[in-house]
Amino acid sequence: MTTESTSTSANTVGARAAVVRNLKTLSAPEEGGTKKEYEDFLEKIQSHVTIGWDFGKDIGHLLKNMEDPVIPEPKDMTEDEEKVKWKKRLWDQEVNRYGTRCVALVKNKGALYTVVMDGVSEIIKSKLKSKTGHSAADKEGDSLWLLGSLEDIMINFEEVKPKILVIDDQMERIMRLKQGESTNEDFLEQVVQELKVYGKHGGDFLWETHRRLSLANV
């Protein structure tokens, strides 16, 4: 089964094709959905938005790293530079592009929220709606909240268990990771993602705590 996002809101600013063709509907684990299918789901959307949306690399970064991209601010011109007309013109263009890029990121994040929600099964939608923070996230089109919550669902990070148990389960998942036939880069990315899940839910490694304490005492 495949789905094509048809939301008109995703086309309101700049070039942004909302339809992700041949995107297979993502199913929950209890429906037979797998982590591999979840990764493929995100990868297909990432490829689509990176190529097809204005400033798509920024939203592609968000999908890959589960964090907002850093958009460098333009540097102010010196008084002498402001007197050179062509430099001033280029600087104005740089400032305009910075503003456009910031606006595009906000609107692309809202569009991404719609695309992801359109692409998941009804059971996943129900699970998402039951999570704390859904109402606010849905109102704001908070794609970071959505991606984080979706990840928890797809890796079976059960919130119904005591927190110490789910953190222990995640640590065991990390310790059982094996590279197999994947490349070093792909395996490292997998490890980093699992570590992010561990940290997001309150887990910590002894050396990370020690490093933070050392920095605090500097």
Image (tube, rainbow, N blue to C red):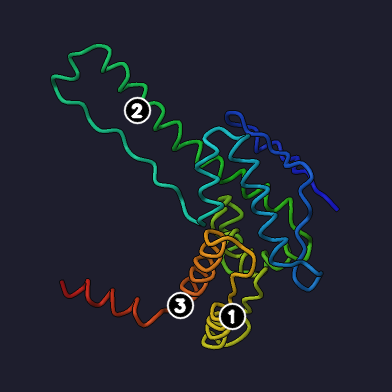
Q: Residue at x 61, y 47 (%)?
A: 46
Question: In which image quadrant can residue 59 be found?
Answer: top right
Disc 1 target residue: 176
Query: Closer to the N terminus: mark 2 or mark 3?
Result: 2
Instruction: Name the spot of residue 191 as percent of width and height, x first.
Output: 52, 69
Disc 3 target residue: 202
Task: Note whether 150 is above or below 174 in the view shown.
Answer: above
Instruction: Name the spot of residue 188 as percent of width and height, x first.
Output: 51, 64
Tell me whether circle 2 and circle 1 mark residues in contact (CB < 8 Å).
no
Label 1: element kind: loop
Foreground disc of the pair 3, 1: 1
Query: Closer to the N terminus: mark 3 or mark 1?
Result: 1
What is the distance, in whole Å, between disc 2 and disc 3 at their CAs?
A: 39 Å
In the foreground, 136 or 2: 2
Q: Amino acid at mark 2?
A: Val
Tell me whether circle 3 and circle 1 mark residues in contact (CB < 8 Å).
no
What is the distance, in whole Å, between disc 3 and disc 1 at their CAs?
A: 20 Å
Disc 2 target residue: 95
Residue 142 appears in the picture as rendered: no
Task: Note whether 73 is above or below 196 in the view shown.
Answer: above
In the foreground, 134 or 181: 181
Instruction: Name the spot of residue 111 as percent of width and height, x first.
Output: 62, 43
Residue 98 appears in the picture as rendered: yes
